[in-house]
Amino acid sequence: MRSLGIEHVLDYETTSPLDTPIPYDAVIDNAGAARIRDWRRVVAPGGSILPNSGVPGPDGGALMRVFKAQWHGLIASQRVRVFTGKVTAPALTELGVLLAAQRISPLLDTIYPLEQAPQALAAAGTHHARGKIVISISPLERHAS
């Protein structure tokens, strides 16, 4: 994260992101483990909160989180928006071109061979991967990173 210009990095396993003396400029909540109202306490006025998780959490499931984000967006001093992505053929083509040119590279946690698919799914279920977990069906891709 620091290589991307992020100044303040914390390990959520040892430090609660809600216990900060420094207000955040922005939060992208991919885990859904905190309520939007709790993020509002630690995000600076004018900052941004992007709840982005389909996993049920303290704000409810995905639809309830969308509703709550819309509500908070109306009353909060921060910008509260729901992140949504739309997959299109042109976007995927551009992504493929960038990957082929090595202008971007995916962050991979582990590549599992097909016969280890249950282990791959178990690893994904822990929600602690440091990148994408891949199940390879190609005999040439049978290594772990």
Image (cartoon, grey):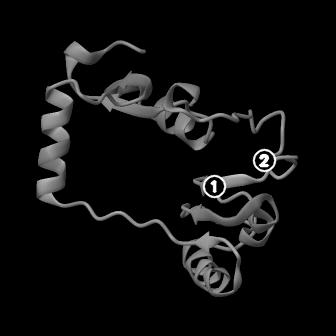
Q: Is residue 60 above or below residue 96?
A: below
- Real-space Cα separation, disc 1 to disc 2, in angstroms: 10 Å
The quarter of the picture where residue 11 lies is top right
Task: Identify which residue, 17 or 122, lies in the foreground.
Answer: 17
Task: Identify which residue, 22 or 13, lies in the foreground.
Answer: 22
Say which element carries label 1. Answer: strand
On screen, residue 139 versus residue 46, left or right, reads left
Q: Residue at x 31, y 27 (%)?
A: 105
Q: Residue at x 74, y 34 (%)?
A: 10
On screen, residue 17 versus residue 118, left or right, reads right
Q: Residue at x 23, y 28 (%)?
A: 103
On screen, residue 139 versus residue 132, left or right, reads left
Position of the N terminus by quadrant: top right
The quarter of the picture where residue 78 lies is bottom right
Q: Is residue 88 above or below residue 79?
A: above
Asked if the residue at tag 2 contacts the one at tag 1, i.e. Cβ–Cβ closer than 8 Å, the answer is: yes
Image location of residue 55, percent across then percent down? 59, 61
The amino acid on which the numbered mark 2 sits, given as a three-letter code, is Pro
The quarter of the picture where residue 94 lies is top left
Nearest to N terminus: mark 1 or mark 2? 2
Q: Which residue is mark 2?
A: 17
Image location of residue 17, percent across then percent down? 78, 47
Task: Identify which residue, 113 or 79, lies in the foreground.
Answer: 79
Q: Which residue is mark 1?
A: 27
Q: Residue at x 42, y 15 (%)?
A: 145
